[in-house]
Image (cartoon, grey):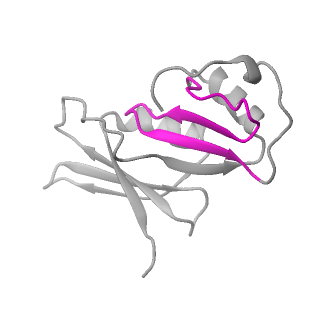
Amino acid sequence: MEYLHTMIRVRDLDASIEFFVKNLGLVETRRREVEAGRFTLVFLATKPGAPEIELTFNWDQKEPYTVGRNFGHLAYDVDDIYQTCERLSKAGVSILRPPRDGKMAFVRSPDQISVELLQKGSPLPAKEPWVSMQNTGEW
């Protein structure tokens, strides 16, 4: 058995691609538009050949998809959790669970998919403003 991908449904494909590609640094590995089914599939990964996430965009979906904590989250290693969170924050992404411990943070995609960011290797030393930041919203 081989892990292939995780699929998430998105309402605004452009906003989701901006979040995952521009803000998180994933790359688009392939795309498929199915006019007969009225949907687009966009596959993203940290690099070609790595496990993917599949963004499924149903062209006629008007209402938000239901959000449940039963999905859990996507998780990615980052080289520097503080630099990553600062860059995301400057891009307008809310840091819902700040990296107070130098190891872990949570953000959400435009479709409210939780994304966990984990510091590669050992946690970084505690650093402001992150140490004093409180959690916001759900993650």
Nearer-the-camera pick, 57 or 96: 96
**Whole-percent x, y for residue 14 in the image:** 41, 35
Q: Is residue 70 left or right of residue 137?
A: left
Residue at x-position 42% and y-position 46%: 72
The answer to which quarter of the image holds residue 46 is: bottom right
Q: Residue at x 58, y 38 (%)?
A: 22
Residue 53 at x, y percent in the picture:
44, 55
The magenta segment is 94-120
Residue 114 magenta-drawn?
Answer: yes
Q: Is residue 136 left or right of residue 58?
A: right
Q: Quadrant of the N terminus?
A: bottom left
**In the image, residue 36 lies at what x, y percent?**
13, 55
Q: Residue furthest left?
A: 36
Q: Is residue 62 left or right of residue 27?
A: left
Q: Residue at x 67, y 46 (%)?
A: 118
The residue nearer to you, when weighing 136 against 94, is 136
- Nearer-the-camera pick, 91 or 8: 8
For residue 123, above or below residue 91: below
Residue at left 76%, top 33%? 82
What is the total number of numbered labels drawn onto the structure image?
Answer: 0
Horizontally, is 74 left or right of 9 in the view?
right
